Amino acid sequence: MTTLTGRGVAPGTAVGRAVVAVREARQVRYRLAANGVERERQRLRTARERTRLELEEISSRISRTVGPAQAAIFAAQLLMLDDPLLTKRADELIRTERLNADWALERAIDELHQVFAREGDAWLRDRVGDFADVGGRLQGNVRPGRDPLVELIQELEPPLIIVADELPPSVAAQLDWSRVRGLVCAVGSPTHHTVILARSLGVPAVVGLGSATQVLMPGQMLAIDGTTGEVVVDPSDDAMDRWRRRGEIAEAALRGLDELRTRPAMTADGVRIRLEANLEMAEEVARVRDAGAEGIGLYRSEFLLDAHPESASEDAQLETYRTLLEAMRPLPVTIRTFDTGEERRVSPARSSGHRQRFGLRGIRAALQNDQRFRTQIRALLRAADAGSLRILLPFVTTSEELRQARALIAEIGRDLGANPVPVGAMIEVPAAALTVDHLAAYADFFSVGTNDLIQYTFAVDRTEERRAGPYEPGAPAVLRLLRSIALQGRRARVDLSVCGEMAGDPMMVALLVGLGFRSFSMTPAAIPILKRALAALDSQEAAVMARRARQAHTADMARAIVEPLAAAMHRAALTDPVS
Ligand code: PEP
Ligand code: MG
């Protein structure tokens, strides 16, 4: 039994067998049960036939169009396909070590690399690239056209724990999470969209275990704690008992919060605070109601595009939005238009995270890719009569963008003969934060996205735990920006809410209340916890603390100022299952 420690980012405990996914979940590894061996060997044979046909086709096309000499490369690759060190070796690994076909191929290719490196023969070394090419083609043909992890999770016996280097949200959105009990990632952070999704589904997660996919072996039993960040490998019976107890204590603590669900949130000195929920998967809307949310403050609609590409048609969207609005009626539902770039649409699993974070994204992409935005707005406006809809525009940077987007929405509304609905803007880019007063001319409400705001304020990647620089929600620079947003919003008399992950953290909410915010949207499970935390907070005291923290010169000094009050709130809110 070994224990590793990463960072707990989604609370709860889980026990299950490891499924390992690497290279952004393009390659998967697991151990087969005895009765799964034949199916896997067949899968390898089929992949070999597909690869053979492809290579024959490429070879004859190149021969015709370029010349026989160039086609010889592919004739040689066809021979490699039958090399005993490749498919035959992979087949042997499936039989003897019970590796899945993808993993067996990966191992065979690695072994080939080692042989070639030892041989030192220049001709052989030149062939390595070709072997890797054939191997890659074979791997792609084991599960053609699908994300391998999505298919695999469907085949394996639960309970499962995914161990990944990085699990992209586009893959996470397609998984059957009822079969997955926990998530362990080499990289990631509390604001990574996959982690946000895990948290809202109640799936414990640990990130920042850099060597996770090398140290944790497929098929191993794991026990994880998403609060403390512990990952126990091959837990003893004793450890399993302890884990079970932790789970029971945490559940009891949550049951203790049940009576809070129907009560409104209030600070100790009687200031009313509005608590709404964030939602990623529309089918999870029951969690929002169960948590006692006063509405949906942020529905991240782009998860629709990842989960099922066909769900992006106007009628499919209409159906989803209508169901959501009906389920929440009469409470408001804030649907954010797709916060994504162009590339996510083309090939979800292959999109570049970098390009998604920068460049043509959110409202910018919407204004350029007119058609997709129009389709979504049409679906939204057609669904509006099913409940209380608010449309939220992401990644706004200037009032001109907002003006154009509103004009487009108004035009579509006129075409449809639809009633107008409130349209708001995310404040998540410093340029927007500094011009809230101008944006107010075109916005019915604002929602502050602290996840991106902090990322762009510090120029650090929010999705990467081991960042090159600070990602400090409580740093003076962030607090000053937030205070400015709160003041500008108040002066302009526009509704203002905070929907980044900061809003669901009892320690940070003390600061946010102190800065003047009165409305928050968060992962559903955090709502009852926050109600208890807020009941222990005096808003005047919070204001004094926030003012002092804004004046601090360093993030550490700000933290020291906030600490006593925040810790008291934290204690009030949580019955820590570990202590
Ligand atoms: C944010 O940026 O804070 C936010 C709520 O949006 P997302 O996390 O989806 O980028
Ligand atoms: Mg954002």
Image (cartoon, rainbow, N blue to C red):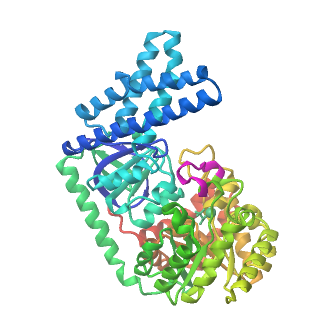
Extreme residue toward the front, this view: 64
Span colored in magenta: 345-355
Compared with 213, 547 (above or below) is: below
- Spot occupied by residue 438 in the image (x, y as percentages of width and height): 81, 74
Most foreground residue, 318 or 15: 318
Place of residue 561 in the rendered image (x, y in percent of width and height, measured from the top left): 59, 62
Whether residue 167 is visible: yes
Q: Residue at x 24, y 45 (%)?
A: 36
> Could you tell me which quadrant the N terminus lies in?
top left
Identity of the residue drawn at 55% across and 30% down: 60
Q: Residue at x 44, y 10 (%)?
A: 119
Residue 387 position, x and y percent, is 55, 88
The vertical placement of 499 against 557, above or below, is below
Q: Quadrant of ligand 2?
A: bottom right
Would residue 435 appear left or right of 10 to someone viewing this image? Answer: right
Q: On screen, 131 above or below 542?
A: above
Q: Main secondary structure of the magenta part?
A: helix
- Position of 472 compared to 94: left or right? right
Left or right side of 59 for 354: right
Pinpoint residue 273: horizontal percent, then vertical percent: 55, 82
At 60% from the left and 54% from the top, the residue drawn is 346
Q: Residue at the left extreme?
A: 237
